[in-house]
Amino acid sequence: MESLLLGINALTFLEKEGFPLLKSYLAQNEKEAASRSLEIGYPVTLKISSPDMIHKTEARGIRVSLKDEIEVRHAFRELVDSFSSSYPEKWLDGIIVQKQGSGIEVIVGMLKDLQFGPVLMFGLGGVFVEAMKDVSFRLIPINASDAKDMMEELKGYDILRRSRSGPIDLPAIEDFLLQFSRFIVLHPEVKEIDINPLFISSLVSGVQICDARIKVVKLS
């Protein structure tokens, strides 16, 4: 039996496993969204959390760069009204209030090959993932040398090395890929996982997960 973890459920699952996340909360009303936004610190992002909605962008389920309480309250009402009218048959957990991500976007994922087992994917995210198809692959488990090679194989590696926004913590990316590989080994029930985007910022911030999709199977 398969189950799909989306939205706040996927983020909560990864947080319990010790992965670095953008600070995120689930809000049930606009007052709670405003309170959580103040707690997180502006700017923030609001996005729908639904077990029935895989692609939030296509569903117009995200509002970014919200700078104050007025914008947050307006965005909350807009998201709930739009979701309810467009998808009356789908379940809405609530609205995720999340710290606005910044830096370079990358994607990390895993799928299980029938012959070789779990395969790790790493590449540039955002506009690059579609425009450049710039990804590298390794069989899991990987070692530190594999993690470094996966980065250096990317056509856009210079984007990571010479970011206009400041120095990128390349060792933090390596550490994340190794942590991800260990996680997959320890969790054979995870059949597929996509972390997209993973934000890579300055040396201070390291890496932070923004969103994820996890397919889990019940082991016999």
Image (spheres, helix red, strand yellow):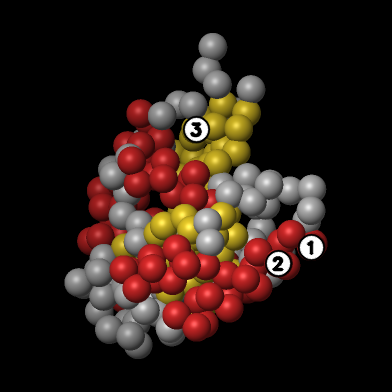
Task: Look at label 1 and name its amino acid.
Answer: Ser
Q: Where is residue 216 in the image (x, y as percent from the top left)?
A: 54, 32
Q: Which of marks 2 and 3 is nearer the N terminus?
A: 2
The circle drawn on residue 85 is 1
Q: Quadrant of the C terminus?
A: top right
Q: Is mark 3 on a helix, strand or loop?
A: strand
Q: Earlier in the sequence, mark 3 or mark 1?
A: 1
Identify residue for label 3.
190
Asked whether, in this view, residue 205 is left or right of residue 52, the answer is: left
Q: Quadrant of residue 148?
A: bottom left
Q: What element carries label 1?
A: helix
Q: Position of residue 147 (x, y in %)?
A: 32, 52
Asked whether, in this view, residue 22 is left or right of residue 107, the answer is: left
Residue 40 seen by the camera: yes
Residue at 62% of width from left, 71% of height from top? 77
Residue 111 seen by the camera: no
Task: Look at label 3 and name its amino acid.
Answer: Val
Q: Residue furthest bottom?
A: 164
Asked whether, in this view, residue 4 is left or right of residue 196, the answer is: right
Identify residue for label 2.
81
In this view, the residue in front, 117 or 106, is 106
**Pointer 1 with pointer 2, Cβ within 8 A:** yes
Q: Position of residue 119 (x, y in %)?
A: 49, 40
Q: Quadrant of the N terminus?
A: top right
Residues under labels 1 and 2: Cα distance?
6 Å
Q: What element carries label 2?
A: helix
Residue at 49% of width from left, 32% of height from top? 190
Q: Which residue lies furthest to the top in this view?
A: 220
